[in-house]
Image (spheres, coloured by chain):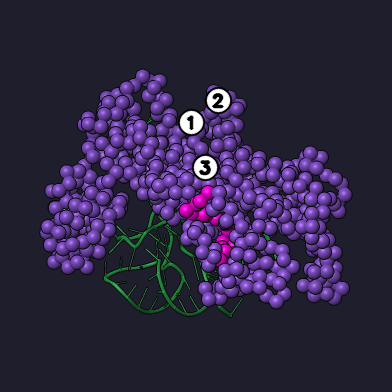
Chain colours: A purple, B green
Amino acid sequence: MTDLIPSIQTAAVEAIAELYGKDVPVDEIVLQETKKEFEGDFTLVVFPLMRYKLGGGPPQVGEALGQALQARLPFIEGYNVIKGFLNLSIRSDWWQQFLGHLQGRPDFYRLNLGQGQSVVVEYCSPNTNKPLHLGHLRNIILGYALSRILEASGYQVHETCLYNDRGTNISKSMYAWLQAGKQETPEMAGVKGDKLVGDYYVAFSRQYAAEVGELIAKGLTKAEAEKAAPSMQAVHEMTVRWEAGDEAVRDLWRKMNQWVYTAFADTFAKLGVKFERFYYESQVYQRGKETVAEGLEKGVFYQEEDGSVVVDLTDDGLDKKVLLRSNGTSLYITQDLAIAEDKFESYQMDRSIYVVGNEQDYHFKVLFKILEKLGKPYAEGLYHLSYGMVDLPSGKMKSREGTTVEADDLMAEMIEQAARETQKLGKTEGMDEAELQALYRTLGIGALKYYLVKVDPRKRMLFDPNESIDLHGQTAPFIQSSYTRTVSIGRKAEAAGMDLVYHPDQTLETPMLEVERSLLRMIFRYPQVLQEAANGYNPALLANYAYDLAKEYNRFYHEAPVLRREQPQTSAFRFALSTQVGQTLKEALALLGIEMPERM
RNA sequence: GGUCCCAUAGCUCAAUGGAUAGAGCAUCUGCCUUCUAAGCAGACGGUUGCAGGUUCGAGUCCUGCUGGGAUCGCCA
């Protein structure tokens, strides 16, 4: 039944051959859902067919095709032609069969685009010197949703996360921690480990800024001052000692990173994300040198006089890029070469996706180009899901200045807001404390995730705390509440002892309503939306789809009473439809990492 | 300065090259003795940044311009 569209296309091709003796390829038959203001379910756009000189304008061809399709396809009940648009109406009993067909068939919500192909999705990838913030949240939600979408589309997905656990940034926190001399632990401070480490990072930035200011006042240029600041020199020295394996530095580094990992694990758990594998920059950064050697051997890279290794990509519209410092140490891009190799060894992936902000567009262009030049078998499957930054009404977030919105704080706030709103509405009678807490969490975290995922990933977005905390309108709670309505009707019917078993062959007491057809069309579209989301790496499509479906369901809810004893057939049909909408909403949001409450 | 991205209603966002560009928020008007009002119905709101071009048809594709953002060999 799901091949309705192809069967119309095929019939149209056949009809054209018969009527006009012309051969038109199937994909020239453009079918779309009929716009609300016109009558019909699907619309065949006639204009493109004019190229084939069928003899007659769009209205004539549309009329002839309409007639031919209705004669050929028993499920077409009627048609109308407006300008170059042929609107086709599908018989109500076909829609009834479609609904019956869906019942107990979860595979309707799965695709097999991937055919079991292996895909690696790397996301989140934080530095270990500060808490996760709003930007990480967008990243995590996108990466998680994309993973679920690809999984539902028939790929075997491996989720990885890269910890940038070494280098200047973490040295800054370590330096400031030592400077403070308090031997402070998260337990002592009563804060999460990532927060504590982040506080010292901010402390460093303050001290550094002050030193630079003083030096500039003494007459140094900004660049000179930044280089000469004692705190920064100490940090660089600390990084060198770390690389040399200095035990004291390594011990402190291990201790502070462990605080952070413990804290991150807690945040990941609250968000419901789980990585199959963590990569640690400290463990792989040296391995990049092997790839550098390989590139030199193959003549893809070359060595400058000062010893640094460089790749020249000017012929590819890019610049020259240093891959190994003159002192022999490796750079960020060097380790990415190593990790790409490791991923292929571990997962033999057909595609490898990096969910990383668009500020690194250039980095990934270079990385992918290098891997291509090295002739890596996986080079073709590399993809950078480049998402836009999250801005605050006050402007850009700056972690050095401590003006970020931290993930933990934001989640807590959203849960509190959900609790307040739920208590205000007072519809949770009989739920115990644990159930209530779970509900607040489902609503609050759901709202947050939805807010961040509903926007096209590629676009920069604004995070307005006031708007995001609103649980009305286009939000997760709106969709969740629509879902609970579908559940609640079932509870009511059960309590009333009604028999609502749906028999697709039985005739409804009243003709199918437009809103009912519309809901069926929307459910019918689900696989297509999933496919577009998977092929376009765009979870926002599912978020917007779920909202549209929920909105239409609410219209149905007001217009079409489900539980009516005097119309058992209609009642059973509506109940089946309502339940199926609920199922569809649940499937869609699950792919976005958003759970459904059974009541709220 | 070079390269890349973005610009749609007061604000935040939608719209496989297809019909009269749609939602939410905000403002205003109705609807809870009837399956949960986190809802529904309606009003208001647009020169899709500007100028050209391609096309039967452009918010969507191409060129130029304006404005905003990102980035530009030894940071990550």
Q: Which residue is mark 2?
A: A431
Question: Helix or strand or loop: what does disc 2 sit on?
Answer: loop
Q: Which of labels 3 and 1 is toward the front? A: 3
User: Which chain letter goes with mark 3?
Assistant: A
Q: Which residue is mark 1?
A: A598
Residue at image point 78% right, 42% down: A186
Residue at image point 17% right, 46% down: A73
For the residues bearing labels 2 and 1, Cβ distance under 8 angstroms: no
The amino acid on which the numbered mark 1 sits, given as a three-letter code, is Glu
Residue at image point 38% right, 36% down: A106
User: Tag 1: Cα neighbours inside 10 Å, few (<14), some, or many (≥20)?
Assistant: some
**Front in this rendered view, residue A281 or A72:** A281
The amino acid on which the numbered mark 3 sits, given as a three-letter code, is Gly
B19 relative to A71 in the view: left or right: right
Asked whether residue A355 is drawn in magenta, I would say yes
* Residue A520 spot, x, y in % from top left: 32, 41
* Residue A255 spot, x, y in % from top left: 77, 45
